[in-house]
Image (tube, rainbow, N blue to C red):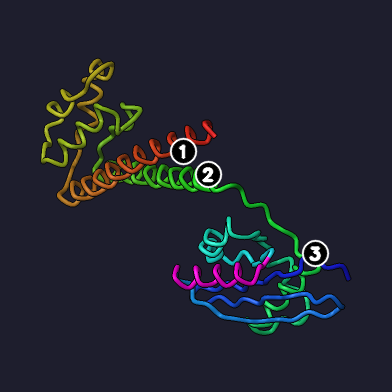
Amino acid sequence: MQRLFRVCAGIDVHKRSIYVCLVKAAPDASFTKEVRSFGATTHELLGLRDWLTREHCQSVSMESTGVYWKPVFNILEGALKVVLVNAHHVKGLPGRKTDVQDCEWLAELHLHGLTRPSFIPPSEIRELRELVRTRTTLKQDRARHVNRIAKVLEDANIKLGNVASDILGVSGRAMLDAIVAGQTNAAELAQLAVGRLRSKQTALQQALHGFVKPHHRLLIQTHLQLIDAFDASLDALTIQIEECMHRMALT
């Protein structure tokens, strides 16, 4: 069977340990194996990289196990070729019983070109993708807290959402802050409206007349504080995303 590399390795990645099999092909049909284990800390991974480069390893194959492969890939990237393999593609193959056998099997498959590489985007794309995914998640979490405020208002029979399209707009936020501060007078709360919402004073007074209890104020205050924290994080993420896209455009 054709061999693609003179020296290559297979890596079996776990949360706390990493097993590596280094395979060296001989001029004849034989090849030698050397198996070592490493920890998952940065110091251990740097030792792994130094060992592979000293042995003139040409390429490395490892399974995409959860998120545990990422630190290994980040450290090995640039020093040698790293091929990420979907664990499902090699799961059904025979001879895989222990961690040592796993890395040996990966190394042998990789030596003969039998591993199917997964696509890994450049580091700039990976960074941008993580930032965008985090921002999307935070937006979804923020929306959940807005919905919870709406439920608390309904429980207190405050119908602000029936009059204001956005209960966290400028007017709605001022009213919510006033409610948290202890204001119960519907007329006083309605006077906090700005813009086009000021023309709906009668409807606002009727909507803001409810039965707000101390626990309602505490719940609203809690959700508002979390929403403010989400807004600050979203602003920071947006700035970072724009900077990342600007760097990519320059390159």
Q: Nearer the viewer, mark 1 or mark 3?
A: 3
> Looking at the image, which is closer to me, 12 or 143?
12
- Amino acid type at mark 2: Glu
Q: Are marks 2 and 1 in contact (CB under 8 Å)?
A: yes
At a point 48% along the width and 42% down the height, the residue shown is: 132
| Quadrant into which the C terminus falls | top right
Locate residue 157 relative to residue 53 in the image: left or right: left
In the shown orientation, is residue 56 left or right of residue 125? right
State whether residue 233 is above or below residue 105: above
User: Which percent across, then down, holds residue 213?
Assistant: 16, 48
- Circle 3 — which element? loop
Q: Is residue 116 left or right of residue 150?
A: right
Q: Quadrant of residue 11?
A: bottom right
Q: Does label 1 or label 3 sit earlier along the sequence?
A: 3
- Residue 145: percent from left, percent from top: 34, 46
Is residue 9 or residue 201 the one in the foreground? 9
Q: Which residue corresponds to mark 2?
A: 124
Q: Which quadrant, please, contains the N terminus?
A: bottom right
Identify residue for label 3: 4
Boundaries of the magenta span: 42-57
Instruction: Determine which residue is flagged by label 1.
Output: 244
- The amino acid at mark 3 is Leu
Q: CA distance from mark 2 to mark 3?
A: 29 Å
Q: Badge 3 local density, few (<14 within 10 Å), some, or many (20+)? A: some
Q: Earlier in the sequence, mark 2 or mark 1?
A: 2
Q: Is residue 207 magenta?
A: no
Give the mark, 2 or 3, whose residue is nearer the N terminus.
3
